[in-house]
């Protein structure tokens, strides 16, 4: 794990082990500058790179971002193609970075309807990830929280029918999620001014602390991560128990 930075808010006190972020506000960021929405996504992808690096540097173990939902296919073809293009570009880059910095990258979601070139890159990054155990970035792609739960239920039912699974528990069910093996997010941040989860990590967010901010995602900086961590530290996490 990288040493904590001492010159930032992340330097003191308990750090969330897993931060998850809903990338929102790319379109509005572009509109404010009279640019096409796709320019907002390009800026948002760059912000992802910056924020992922920062999270790794301050000692966060997992960063999960919501990049493309099962509902985002409803957007104009040109916008969807641009987002897929950006994902390809950043995944190709990630392949080199992962080898150099020993980081892991996992895609959460159903890859089956993604372009073939993206699926190849997803397999490649998954393969590289098996060699390392450091910081892990998770990118939710063709992901929906309810879809994840339904798929988990179907896979459990198949295993049960085939005699491969015993009684269902919260713990064993977690093992059927795309997020199997990843601790639940401690902190979920939503930039862009909306106050909802939009089908993000419906199972995993049961006890996450939620922080909402009006900052549009492409404008998001390390200071915004620090501020969210500060807010997280002020929260009293009781997990249904009482204050000790
Ligand atoms: C939400 O903003 C953003 C998206 C649906 C796409 C996010 C995708 C990327 C940034 C591409 C690459 C990602 C990675 C991780 C490399 P919005 O379009 O809903 O914004 P608006 O609410 O202002 O319209």
Image: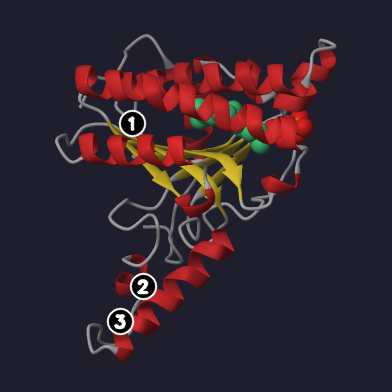
Whether pointer 1 and pointer 3 mark residues with C-beta atoms closer than 8 Å, the reply is no
State left or right for residue 28 relative to residue 88.
Answer: right
Q: Residue at x 53, y 51 (%)?
A: 113
Whether pointer 1 and pointer 2 mark residues with C-beta atoms closer than 8 Å, the reply is no
Q: CA distance from mark 2 to mark 3?
A: 12 Å
Q: Is residue 192 visible?
A: no
Instruction: Report which residue position mark 1 lands on.
Output: 60
Q: Residue at x 80, y 13 (%)?
A: 35
Considering only order in the chain, which callout, 3 or 1, is on the residue closer to the N terminus? 1
The quadrant of the picture showing ligand 1 is top right
SS under mark 2? helix
Q: Residue at x 23, y 40 (%)?
A: 127
Give the mark toward the camera: 1 or 3: 3
Q: Residue at x 16, y 34 (%)?
A: 132
Q: How many numbered discs, if any?
A: 3
The reply to whether the residue tagged 2 has its Cβ within 8 angstroms of ligand 1 is: no
In this view, the residue in front, 131 or 80, is: 80
Q: Residues within 10 Å of mark 2 (few under 14, many from 20)?
A: some
């Amino acid at each position: 794990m990288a040493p904590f930075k001492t010159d930032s808010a992340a330097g003191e006190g308990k750090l969330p082990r897993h931060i998850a972020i809903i990338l929102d506000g790319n379109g509005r960021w572009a509109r404010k500058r009279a640019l096409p929405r796709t320019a907002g996504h390009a800026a948002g992808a760059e912000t992802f790179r910056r924020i992922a690096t920062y999270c790794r540097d301050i000692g966060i173990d997992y960063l999960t971002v919501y990049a493309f939902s099962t509902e985002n296919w409803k957007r104009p073809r040109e916008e969807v193609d641009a987002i897929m293009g950006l994902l390809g570009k950043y995944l190709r880059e990630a392949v080199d970075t992962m080898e150099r910095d020993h980081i892991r990258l996992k895609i959460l979601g159903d890859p089956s309807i993604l372009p073939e070139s993206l699926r190849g890159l997803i397999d490649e990054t998954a393969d590289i990830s098996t060699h390392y155990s450091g910081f892990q970035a998770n990118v939710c792609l063709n992901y929906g929280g309810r879809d994840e739960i339904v798929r988990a239920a179907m896979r459990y039912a198949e295993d049960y029918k085939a005699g491969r699974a015993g009684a269902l528990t919260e713990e064993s069910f977690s093992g059927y999620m795309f997020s199997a093996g990843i601790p639940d997010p401690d902190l979920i941040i939503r930039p862009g001014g909306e106050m909802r989860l939009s089908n993000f990590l419906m199972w995993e967010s049961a006890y996450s602390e939620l922080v909402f901010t009006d900052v549009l995602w492409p404008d998001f900086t390390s200071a915004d991560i620090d501020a969210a961590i500060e807010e997280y530290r002020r929260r009293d996490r009781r997990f249904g128990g009482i204050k000790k």
